[in-house]
Amino acid sequence: MIKNVCILNYGLGNILSLKNAITHLGFKNNFYSDMVEKNYDCLILPGVGSFAKAMSLLKGNKLEKIIQDARKKKILIIGICLGMQLLFDRGYEEKLTNGLSLIEGEIKMIDKLNLKLPHVGWKKTQFLNIEKNSFFSKFENQKFYYVHSYVAKLNNNKNILATAYYHNYKFIAGVKKENLIGFQFHPEKSGEVGLELINDLFRNY
């Protein structure tokens, strides 16, 4: 069970709504600047903005080291929206940019010409490969809130946790690899079902 959450505040993302959601659920949480002398068992990487800008704020400094150290220590890392995308090898938003390379794959723009971007709205989400995390099955076909123009392309489909459709365009909605979990949607902005997802994840991890 997760007891203490660290939200990595690196300058991009609606971190206050995330903090409020976690506090509402009864879990201790702080922004990184407050966590210097505290232990945490979950690190959340939020994000709203461009892949290139985000990596310029993270790469080669103490913030990247925090993420890499959490990975090595098997601390649960949750990436949300852009935060999920940063876990991948590279992204193509603005320019080709190397990511954190924690999950094999890349981030590319939604390539259906007839679809309006960004993709904004509530979409039914299908959860896959959930044998080891069966609690995700209760969220099958529940609607979550999305805001994005780019999607993940995975090298290994075993790392797909969830998918969704934007009209007839199928995209990856969630990923999982060992202690890494990523959501393309915003659980903290997805009403009661989003809060329930966060709560169940923290209580079952």
Image (cartoon, helix red, strand yellow):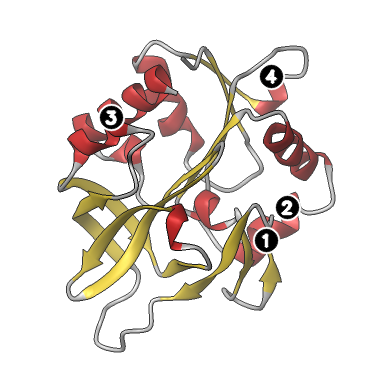
In front here: 97 or 132?
A: 132
Q: Is residue 175 above or below residue 4?
A: below
Residue 34: which disc? 4
x 63%, y 45%: residue: 11
Between marks 3 and 1, how big is the CA–CA gap?
A: 30 Å
Disc nearer the start of the sequence (2/1): 2
x 31%, y 89%: residue: 113
Disc nearer the start of the sequence (3/1): 1
Instruction: Label 2: state its secondary structure.
Output: helix
Between marks 3 and 4, how big is the CA–CA gap?
A: 31 Å
Disc nearest the viewer among 2 and 3: 3
Instruction: Label 1: state its secondary structure.
Output: loop
Other-residue count near label 4 (Cα within 10 Å), few / some / many at <14 / 14–19 / ≥20: few
Between marks 2 and 3, how big is the CA–CA gap?
A: 34 Å
In front here: 175 or 6?
A: 175
Residue 88: which disc? none
- Locate residue 68, reporting x and y percent: 74, 41
Q: Residue most toward the front?
A: 131
Quadrant hosting residue 173: bottom left
Q: Residue most toward the bottom?
A: 113
Which residue is denoted by mark 3 in the rendering?
A: 135
Q: Are marks 3 and 1 in contact (CB under 8 Å)?
A: no
Which residue is denoted by mark 1 in the rendering?
A: 99
Disc 3 residue type? Phe
